[in-house]
């Protein structure tokens, strides 16, 4: 990451202090609500429904156990993992070659393709679930893990193309050319030279696709009935589920996503830096 | 392999995928909104949509929510991006904390703010313990649309400011450092450097961030479901009700067309309002 210019002159003491206070306040603004959810999820059901609430919980896994044991939850979790996994594979397998082509070749129609990719971002993509519901009934993909993964891939694909495009653009063409002069063909050069270099970035874009699918609610709720994913399950039980079920479910939804994003944090920025242009 | 056909071969899977699962479905959904199952072109689904008693409210709340939430997020993300760029130690840690909500789904964000605004939630506990209220207040009850709206707005601001922050931080990273040094030499203060250098050169990033954020704001759905149930109607919630609960595909498609329409209008607006004059580049 490039070190950005210092735009806050504030070398005076008061300015330093207000700078620090603003930073701390904004951190608390992000962290406190998250803490409250986690603290609720790890409280006994009786404490969750009690009033007034304590800020420091008596740590208890009863709510989480209740949630995991609740009818349909393990199945929903399994569906979520399957859909996210399929999405991840499809988004990378389809997106990475496109990213490579955009970074390495000049050809007619390149701009048209880029516009199509950018266009997908200017559309409310979850709405795709409506026509897909009808399409899937016709081809027998309705209420399947694979069908939902297709819709989620549409969500994740533009990002996968853009991330891999920026990754490949970051690797000098000379490296590849050197491998060619040493007797590699295009494929060998790619596998031996380029692939190891971009592997961490590809993993990052895969994880990003996984999280996109894991978190998606609308399409999942519209397209699945039997094979509900965890967000779809939670959405449909909002009306009648007890509070501790909602909070434990929310925590189970949030924690893996946070863990995954921790590993890809440095790629978030390179991706958007390129995507701007 | 010929390197002339190679790029097309590499783009083929992505192109086919987008044609089948992006462009074609959008044609389908438009057709569904304008035509009956028998293929007869009609406007009756739009008439049905408009005449529904929830229609005006759903449109109103969706638009007002975007109008309230997005400007706050713009200011907040600009502030955060500026703070971060003035930071030497701990920059990565602070950025990680501020981008945490990026990994949190809208449904989970709704549930998180439910923990605060629920009748037995943390806000009521706080008010009760400090003696400000005697009885817990039903912030999210069906009669308190105002507080539901505030809760939804806060949850949206909390959850989705990070996406703008990431785009703006990346954009600020692209601005040449020399501009700031030169400005400093000529005696420009922090505010002047922000308005004369950062803002104008950040235009493309601001454009991307606003387009993306406003479209997402029009799609608001799960946060509202978690906090307000159906007490606060929004457009996307109506699509869901039509499609999933009432099995009325055509009216759902009409609602979808409306969301698409306001999304396109806002995209075109930001492309025009924040256009970069030709030949000017950071």
Image (tube, helix red, strand yellow):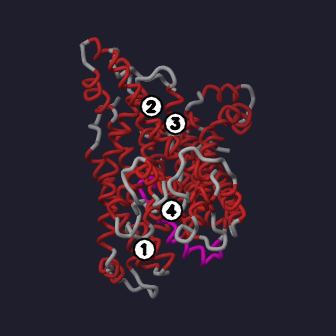
In the rendered structure, find residue A24 and report the number of the disc placed on it: 2
Q: Secondary structure at mark 3?
A: helix
Q: Which residue is mark 4?
A: B22
CA gap between label 3 and label 4 equals 34 Å
Q: Which of the chains bears the disc numbered 2?
A: A
Residue A148 at x, y percent in the picture: 61, 65
Task: Tell me the distance, in whole angstroms, between the alpha carbons under discs 1 and 2.
Answer: 45 Å
Residue extending furthest toward the top? B185
Quadrant of the image occupied by residue B228: bottom left
Query: In this figure, which residue is indicated by the disc labeled 3?
Result: B97
The image shows residue B107, relative to residue A185, as above or below, that is: below
In the rendered view, would you say B116 is above or below A226?
A: above
Same chain for labels 1 and 3? Say yes or no. Answer: yes
Disc 1: which residue: B253
Indicate which label's residue lies in the foreground, 2 or 4. 2
Of the numbered discs 3 and 4, the one sitting upstream in the chain is 4
Category of crowding for the residue at label 1, using alpha-carbon neighbours closer than 10 angstroms: few (below 14), some (14–19), many (at least 20)? many
The answer to whether one can see residue A155 in this image is yes
Alpha carbon separation for disc pair 2 and 3: 11 Å
Residue in the foreground of this view, choosing between B266 and B240: B240
In terms of secondary structure, where does tag 2 sit? helix
Q: Earlier in the sequence, mark 4 or mark 1?
A: 4
For the point 52% across and 62% down, the residue is: B19
Residue in the image at 64% along x and 51% along y: A42
Q: Residue furthest bottom?
A: B38
Please check whether the numbered discs 2 and 4 fall on a single chain. Answer: no
Q: Which residues are magenta?
A: A119-143
The image shows residue A209 at horizontal and vertical percentages of: 60, 50
């Amino acid at each position: 990451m490039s070190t950005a210019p210092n735009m806050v002159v504030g070398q005076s003491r008061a300015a330093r202090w207000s700078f620090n206070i603003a930073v701390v306040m904004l951190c608390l603004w992000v962290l406190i609500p998250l803490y409250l959810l986690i603290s609720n999820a790890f409280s006994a059901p009786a404490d969750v429904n009690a009033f007034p609430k304590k800020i420091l919980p008596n740590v208890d896994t009863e709510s989480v156990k209740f949630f995991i044991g609740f009818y349909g939850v393990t199945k929903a979790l399994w569906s979520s993992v399957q859909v996210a996994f399929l999405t991840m594979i499809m988004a990378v397998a389809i997106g990475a070659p496109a990213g490579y082509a955009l970074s390495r070749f000049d050809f007619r129609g390149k701009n048209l393709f880029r516009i199509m990719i950018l266009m997908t971002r200017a559309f409310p993509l979850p709405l795709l679930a409506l026509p897909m519901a009808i399409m899937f009934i016709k081809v027998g993909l309705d209420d399947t893990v694979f069908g939902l993964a297709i819709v989620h891939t549409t969500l994740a694909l533009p990002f996968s193309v853009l991330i891999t495009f920026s990754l490949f653009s970051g690797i000098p063409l000379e490296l590849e050319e050197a491998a060619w002069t040493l007797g590699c063909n295009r494929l060998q050069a790619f596998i031996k030279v380029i692939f190891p270099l971009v592997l961490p970035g590809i993993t990052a874009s895969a994880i990003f696709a996984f999280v996109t699918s894991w978190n998606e609610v609308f399409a999942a709720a519209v397209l699945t009935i039997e094979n509900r994913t965890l967000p779809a399950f939670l959405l449909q039980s909002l009306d009648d589920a007890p509070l501790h079920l909602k909070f434990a479910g929310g925590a189970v939804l949030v924690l893996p996503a946070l863990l995954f994003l921790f590993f890809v944090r440095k790629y978030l920025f390179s991706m958007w830096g390129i995507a701007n242009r | 392999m010929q390197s002339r056909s190679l790029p097309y071969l590499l783009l083929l899977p992505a192109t086919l995928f987008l044609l089948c699962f992006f462009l074609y479905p959008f044609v389908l959904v438009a057709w569904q909104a304008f035509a009956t199952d028998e293929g007869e072109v009609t406007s009756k689904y739009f008439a049905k949509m408009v005449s529904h008693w929830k229609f005006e409210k759903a449109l109103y709340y969706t638009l007002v929510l975007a109008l309230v939430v997005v400007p706050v997020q713009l200011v907040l993300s600009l502030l955060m991006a500026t703070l971060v760029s003035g930071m030497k130690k701990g920059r990565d840690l602070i950025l990680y904390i501020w981008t945490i909500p990026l990994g949190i789904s809208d449904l989970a964000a709704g549930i998180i703010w439910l923990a605060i605004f629920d009748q037995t939630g943390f806000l009521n506990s706080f008010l009760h313990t400090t003696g400000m209220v005697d009885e817990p207040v039903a912030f999210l009850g069906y009669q308190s649309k105002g507080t539901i709206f505030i809760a939804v707005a806060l949850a949206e601001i909390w959850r989705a400011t990070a996406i703008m922050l990431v785009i703006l931080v990346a954009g600020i990273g692209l601005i040449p450092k020399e501009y700031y040094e030169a400005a400093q030499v000529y005696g420009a203060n922090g505010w002047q450097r922000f308005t004369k250098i950062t803002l104008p050169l950040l235009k493309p990033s601001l454009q991307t961030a606003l387009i993306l954020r406003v479209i997402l704001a029009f799609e608001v759905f799960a946060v509202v479901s978690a906090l307000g149930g159906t007490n606060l109607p929004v457009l996307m919630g109506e699509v869901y009700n039509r499609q999933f609960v009432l099995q009325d595909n055509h009216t759902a498609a009409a609602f979808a067309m409306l969301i698409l329409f306001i999304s396109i209008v806002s995209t075109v607006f930001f492309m025009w309002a924040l256009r970069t004059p030709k030949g000017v580049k950071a």
